[in-house]
């Protein structure tokens, strides 16, 4: 890819993140983003349809960074505790960026996109699980429940290690429901 294109996209993303620290997504205009990124509108529109598409792309990039930082993705099948630990610590390491990009109305997108990316990974390896309703119910329960439990409890308790350890224990027990066939 052309270095100018890479530089323009980087400037756009950095300007967007800076604006998101101060404004809700709906209040950011292409004009002010372009001014902050030091580009013209045609450059922006050459890469993105609108602010919402840019936001969606940045959200997806953040989630991909989280998922890609999990070094033992395959461990979710045999060591759910290790996988859960890596997932929540990966999220914790990106917390500042998550708080900016997924603030306001964008908040629910984080767990939804994490769920989609994890399912894509799981179903690519085990396509037979895609139509297994028991597996999908437990997986959604673990992903969504674990995320919201983590989020709610870290608001009131700064000991995220203890929260993550509790979530690991809960996830391990949930996993037994699937592997034991009960």
Image (spheres, rainbow, N blue to C red):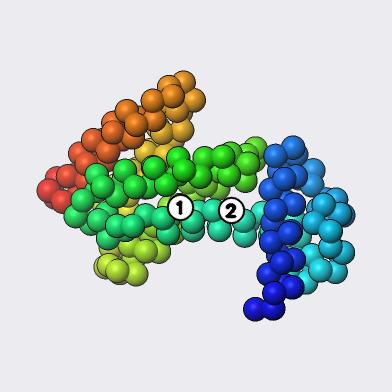
User: Do callouts 1 and 2 mark residues in contact (Cβ within 8 Å)?
Assistant: no
Q: Position of residue 151 (x, y in %)?
A: 46, 33
Quick one: 50 or 64, which is closer to the camera? 64
The x, y position of residue 180, in whole percent, is: 12, 48
Tell me where residue 10 sits by quadrant.
Answer: bottom right
Numbered tag placed on residue 66 in the rendering: 1
Residue 154: percent from left, percent from top: 45, 28
Q: Nearer the viewer, residue 175 or 4?
A: 4
Q: Is residue 166 above or below residue 75?
A: above
Extreme residue toward the top, this view: 156
Asked which quadrant contains residue 74, the reply is: bottom left
Does residue 105 appear to the left or right of 134 in the view shown? Answer: right
| Circle 1 residues within 10 Å: few <14, some 14–19, many ≥20 | many
Residue depicted at x 37% and y 47%: 87
Q: Which mark is residue 59?
A: 2
Direction from residue 167 to residue 36 in the image, left or right? right
Task: Give the structural element (helix, strand or loop) at label 2.
Answer: helix
């Amino acid at each position: 890819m052309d270095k100018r294109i890479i530089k323009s996209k980087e400037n756009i993303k950095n300007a967007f993140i800076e604006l998101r620290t101060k404004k809700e997504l709906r209040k950011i205009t292409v004009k002010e983003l372009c001014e902050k990124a030091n580009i013209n509108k045609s450059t922006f529109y050459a890469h993105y349809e609108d602010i919402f598409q840019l936001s969606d792309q940045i959200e997806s990039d953040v989630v991909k960074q989280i998922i890609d930082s999990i070094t033992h993705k395959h461990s979710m099948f045999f060591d759910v505790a290790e996988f859960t630990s890596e997932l929540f610590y990966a999220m914790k390491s990106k917390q500042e960026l998550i708080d900016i990009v997924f603030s306001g109305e964008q908040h629910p997108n984080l767990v939804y996109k994490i769920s989609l990316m994890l399912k894509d990974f799981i179903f690519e390896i085990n396509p037979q699980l895609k139509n297994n309703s028991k597996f999908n119910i437990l997986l959604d329960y673990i992903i969504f429940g674990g995320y919201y439990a983590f989020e709610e409890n870290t608001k009131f308790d700064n000991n995220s290690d203890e929260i993550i350890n509790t979530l690991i224990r809960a996830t391990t027990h949930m996993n037994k429901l699937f592997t034991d066939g009960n």
